[in-house]
């Protein structure tokens, strides 16, 4: 099977969604499929095109399994929504143009969101090449932007909602990471339709979780090179590892660091990563010696970064856990470390942490509940060990790369077979 993949990040870019798509792609390649990846030039870590990749609008390389085309993502400030919309538009236009002329004739198209604009791009290529389209949703947009207050204009929100529905309906299948997101998308995709058509549209939505590489990421001793390199040896480490953006309640981390600065001198907080919110957080934390900001490490160092923490944090602002499932949660589980999640009650993140016995979940944006839960974890070494072991056992039995790639392979096979059957039926009917 030949697949065209439209995604915003791919190796060597270090974005979490890029790691997800890279591994899915290589699992599909290992199953004998040929791929054409259309993605952005590496830019995630610094929100600028990485050194060595500048100077060309498009770079294409041929591989033994197909080809990779990388186009300029036109990096902008994440807080500037109009500028980001223009940037996404430019990136999408280039990606669409390349997808329509790919020499690897696709049997199917896999498009990833965000950006939402890759949905219409995938649909257009699918129509032109007469192949099915699977639209993979990592974060439900524009819900996240609305919750953060980045989208406030009635007209802009209405246009984004319209584009969202059109993207879902134009796809042959929509994959999401959890049942929460599935309910969200099913409601939107069916809105305003007659009952029979609404039911067909809802049936398009499938749940396929993000994988975690349980071989690459496995439990290991906390006293490692990462700790030694950053002066963390012998300390109890509370870590947030990931994008330092507007979706995360990292003010909770600063508040906890202030509260424990005198009473728990052996505890150090680490924010590992970069993003739009980091400069302001660093200014606010200037007088906190127990809080470190560390740049994102190369992807091959991820197991060591995760192992270095005694407690990992997953803090999402109110409402956002219903629209997003952080992929880093699965990596933390694989590393065998407990999680403190500050998220909406009853959402996928909270349910996973609680059902797996992998940590504690508290309401979002609640400093008192967050600090109390953190102290419970820090003060009970045996409980942290039990939670870490439960986390590892849960994820090993649930989300391997092979299982996730197999789910996509089966879905494309189903859609391709359905389309061929429809064509045969139409040809038979036209001959009568």
Image (spheres, helix red, strand yellow):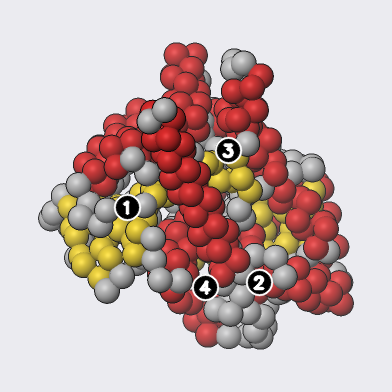
**Nearest to N terminus: mark 4 or mark 2:** 4
Percent of width and height locating residue 110 = 42, 49
Q: Earlier in the sequence, mark 4 or mark 3?
A: 3
Q: CA distance from mark 2 to mark 1?
A: 34 Å
Q: Which residue is mark 4?
A: 302
Distance Cα–Cα, label 4 vs label 3: 35 Å
Q: CA distance from mark 1 to mark 4?
A: 33 Å
Badges 4 and 2: C-beta atoms under 8 Å apart? no
Q: Position of residue 331 (x, y in %)?
A: 61, 67
Q: Disc 2 to disc 3, how far (Cα)?
A: 30 Å
Name the residue: 76% across, 50% down.
Answer: 350
Q: Is residue 254 visible?
A: no
Contact between labelled residues 1 and 3, with CB atoms less than 8 Å apart: no
In the rendered image, the vertical position of residue 195 relative to residue 205, given as above or below: above
Q: Which residue is mark 1?
A: 106
Q: CA distance from mark 4 to mark 2?
A: 11 Å
Report the side of 28 relative to 306 (left or right).
Answer: left
- In this view of the protein, can residue 346 be seen by the observer? yes
Q: Secondary structure at mark 4?
A: helix
User: Residue 260: which quarter of the image?
Assistant: bottom right
- Binning the other alpha carbons within 10 Å of mark 4 as few (below 14), some (14 to 19) or many (20 upward) gives some
Q: Which residue is mark 2?
A: 334
**In the image: residue 139, left or right of residue 334:** left
Label 3 – label 1 distance at C-alpha: 21 Å
Residue under the image location 37 percent in, 56 percent down = 3
SS category of the residue bearing label 2 = helix
Residue 145 position in % (x across, y down): 52, 32
Q: Position of residue 365 (x, y in %)?
A: 71, 41
Which of the 4 image quadrants contains residue 125?
top left
Q: Which mark is residue 204?
A: 3
């Amino acid at each position: 099977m030949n697949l065209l993949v439209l995604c915003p990040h791919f190796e060597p870019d270090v974005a979490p969604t890029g790691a997800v798509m890279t591994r899915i792609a290589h699992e599909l390649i290992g199953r004998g499929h040929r791929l054409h990846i259309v993605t952005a030039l590496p830019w995630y870590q610094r929100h600028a095109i990485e050194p060595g990749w500048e100077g060309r609008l498009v770079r294409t390389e041929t591989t033994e399994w197909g080809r990779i085309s990388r186009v300029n993502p036109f990096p902008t400030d994440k807080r500037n929504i109009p500028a980001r919309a223009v940037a996404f538009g430019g990136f999408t236009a280039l990606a669409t143009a390349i997808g329509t002329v790919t020499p690897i004739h696709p049997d199917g198209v896999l498009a990833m969101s965000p950006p939402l604009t890759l949905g219409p791009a995938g649909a257009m290529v699918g129509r032109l090449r007469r192949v099915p389209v699977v639209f993979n949703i990592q974060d439900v947009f524009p819900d996240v932007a609305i919750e953060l207050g980045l989208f406030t204009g009635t007209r802009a929100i209405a246009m984004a909602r319209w584009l969202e529905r059109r993207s879902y309906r134009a796809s042959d299948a929509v994959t999401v990471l959890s049942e929460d997101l599935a309910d969200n998308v099913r409601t939107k995709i069916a809105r305003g339709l007659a009952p029979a058509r609404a039911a067909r549209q809802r049936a398009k939505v499938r749940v396929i979780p993000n994988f975690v590489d349980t071989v690459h990421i496995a439990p290991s001793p906390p006293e490692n090179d990462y700790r030694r390199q950053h002066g963390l040896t012998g300390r109890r480490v509370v870590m947030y590892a990931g994008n330092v953006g507007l979706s995360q309640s990292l003010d909770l981390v600063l508040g906890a660091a202030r509260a424990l600065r005198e009473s728990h001198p052996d505890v150090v907080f680490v924010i590992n990563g970069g993003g739009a919110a980091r400069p302001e957080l660093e200014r606010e934390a200037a007088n906190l010696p127990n809080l470190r900001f560390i740049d994102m490490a190369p992807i091959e160092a991820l197991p060591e970064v995760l192992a270095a923490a005694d407690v990992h944090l997953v803090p999402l602002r109110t409402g956002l856990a219903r629209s997003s499932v952080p992929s880093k949660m699965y990596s933390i589980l694989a590393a065998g470390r407990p999680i403190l999640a500050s998220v909406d009650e009853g959402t996928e993140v909270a349910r996973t942490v609680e059902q797996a016995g992998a940590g504690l979940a508290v309401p979002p944006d609640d400093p008192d509940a967050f600090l109390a839960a953190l102290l419970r974890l820090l003060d009970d070494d045996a409980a942290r060990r039990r939670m870490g072991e439960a986390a590892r056992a849960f994820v090993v039995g649930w989300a391997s790369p092979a299982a996730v790639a197999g789910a996509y392979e089966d879905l494309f096979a189903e859609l391709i077979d359905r389309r061929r059957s429809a064509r045969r039926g139409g040809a038979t009917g036209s001959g009568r």
